[in-house]
C-alpha cells in the first residue's frame, strides 16, 4: 500500500495535514455520518469544509459532494490503518479521552480530559518544555500502554510513537511535558530494561541544538 495520504476532492478540507488534521476516531465518526444519511447536518459539513477557501465551498452540499467526501474519508481510514503499527490497540479499545491521530511518520496522542499536577513545579530541575523518551525493542503496544497510563495520571502536552522503526531498530515514545518534575516518577514506573528503557527528559531547545543533558546521558547507561 502507498504510504502517501490521499488527496482531498474539491471542496473538502485536507484532514491529514495542518491546519485541518482530524483524529482517527473523528474520521470514523464523520464517515459513519455520511454513510447513514444523505441529509447532511450543517455541523458535519462545516467540519469537512473548514479550511476550504470560501469561494470553493458549495452553498449546500450536493449528493455528488457527499459521495466524494465519503470516498475520501474511507481512503483516509485505509491509509491510516495501513501505516499504523499493527501491535497498537484497536481504536475501540482506547480510552474515550485518549485521542489518536495517525499521520505521516507518527502516531500522535492527545488527552481531552484534565489531570492536575501531583508534584509542585519546584520539584523540576528544568522549567523548560521538553519530552520524556522511552525505547523498546519489542512491540509499539508497550509504549502505547505507557501513554494511556500516564495520560490518566499526570498532565502532558501530548505524545507520539513512530509509524515505522528508525535506524536504531527500537520503537520510541516521545511524551511531552512542560518541565521534568516527574523524572523520578516515570522512571520508577516504566524503566524495565530490556523490555522498556527510560532515557530521561530532553529539553526542546536541546533537541533543536542536538544537545543532551547530563541527566539524559546518565539515563542511557
Image (spheres, rainbow, N blue to C red):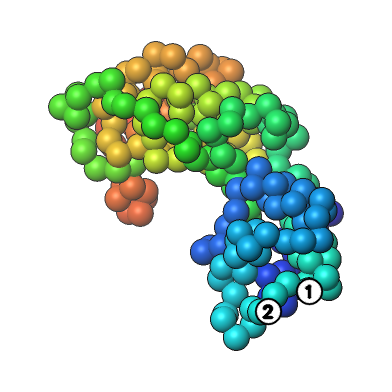
Which residue is found at the position 32% from the left and 18% from the top?
A: 184
| Residue linked to disc 2 | 58
Q: Is residue 63 above or below residue 70?
A: below
Q: Position of residue 152 (x, y in %)?
A: 46, 24
Question: Mark 1: few, some, or many residues within 10 Å (few <14, many ≥20)?
Answer: few
Whether residues under marks 1 and 2 lie with C-beta atoms below 8 angstroms apart, the answer is yes
Q: Position of residue 180 (x, y in %)?
A: 29, 31
> Regarding mark 1 in the picture, which secondary structure is present there?
loop
| Residue linked to disc 1 | 62
* Residue nearest the observer in this picture, 98 or 215: 98
In the image: residue 160, left or right of residue 45: left
Image quadrant in which you'd find residue 145:
top right
Q: Is residue 80 above or below residue 41?
A: above
* Residue most extreme to the left: 122
* Residue nearest the observer in this picture, 193 or 17: 17
Q: Position of residue 75 (x, y in %)?
A: 80, 57
Which residue is found at the position 66% from the left and 79% from the top?
A: 59
The answer to whether residue 62 shows anywhere in this view is yes
* Residue most extreme to the bottom: 55
What is the spatial separation of the Cα atoms under label 1 and label 2, in whole angstroms?
Answer: 8 Å
Image quadrant in which you'd find residue 1:
bottom right
Q: Position of residue 101 (x, y in %)?
A: 60, 46
The answer to whether residue 166 shows anywhere in this view is no
In the image: residue 169, left or right of residue 174: right
Which residue is found at the position 55% from the left and 44% from the top?
A: 108
In the image: residue 145, left or right of residue 191: right
Quarter of the picture holding the C terminus? top left
Which residue is found at the position 54% from the left and 34% from the top?
A: 98
So how many labels did they put on this image? Answer: 2
In the image: residue 7, left or right of residue 190: right
Amino acid at each position: 500500500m502507498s504510504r502517501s495520504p490521499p488527496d482531498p476532492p474539491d471542496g473538502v478540507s485536507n484532514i491529514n495535514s495542518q491546519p485541518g488534521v482530524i483524529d482517527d476516531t473523528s474520521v470514523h465518526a464523520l464517515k459513519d455520518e455520511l454513510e447513514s444519511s444523505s441529509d447532511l447536518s450543517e455541523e458535519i459539513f462545516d467540519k469537512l469544509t473548514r479550511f476550504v477557501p470560501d469561494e470553493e465551498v458549495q452553498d449546500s452540499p450536493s449528493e455528488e459532494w457527499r459521495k466524494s467526501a465519503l470516498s475520501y474519508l474511507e481512503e483516509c481510514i485505509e491509509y491510516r490503518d495501513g501505516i499504523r503499527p499493527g501491535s497498537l490497540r484497536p481504536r475501540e479499545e482506547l480510552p474515550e479521552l485518549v485521542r489518536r491521530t495517525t499521520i505521516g511518520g507518527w502516531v500522535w496522542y492527545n488527552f481531552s480530559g484534565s489531570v492536575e499536577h501531583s508534584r509542585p513545579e519546584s520539584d523540576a530541575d528544568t522549567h523548560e518544555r521538553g519530552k520524556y523518551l522511552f525505547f523498546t525493542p519489542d512491540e509499539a503496544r508497550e509504549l502505547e500502554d505507557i501513554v494511556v497510563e500516564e495520560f490518566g495520571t499526570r498532565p502532558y502536552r501530548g505524545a507520539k510513537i513512530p509509524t515505522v522503526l528508525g535506524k536504531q531498530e527500537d520503537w520510541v515514545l516521545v511524551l511531552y511535558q512542560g518541565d521534568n518534575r516527574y523524572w523520578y516518577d516515570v522512571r520508577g514506573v516504566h524503566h524495565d530494561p530490556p523490555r522498556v528503557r527510560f532515557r530521561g527528559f530532553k529539553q526542546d531547545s536541546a533537541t533543536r541544538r542536538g544537545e543532551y543533558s547530563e541527566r539524559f546521558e546518565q539515563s542511557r547507561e
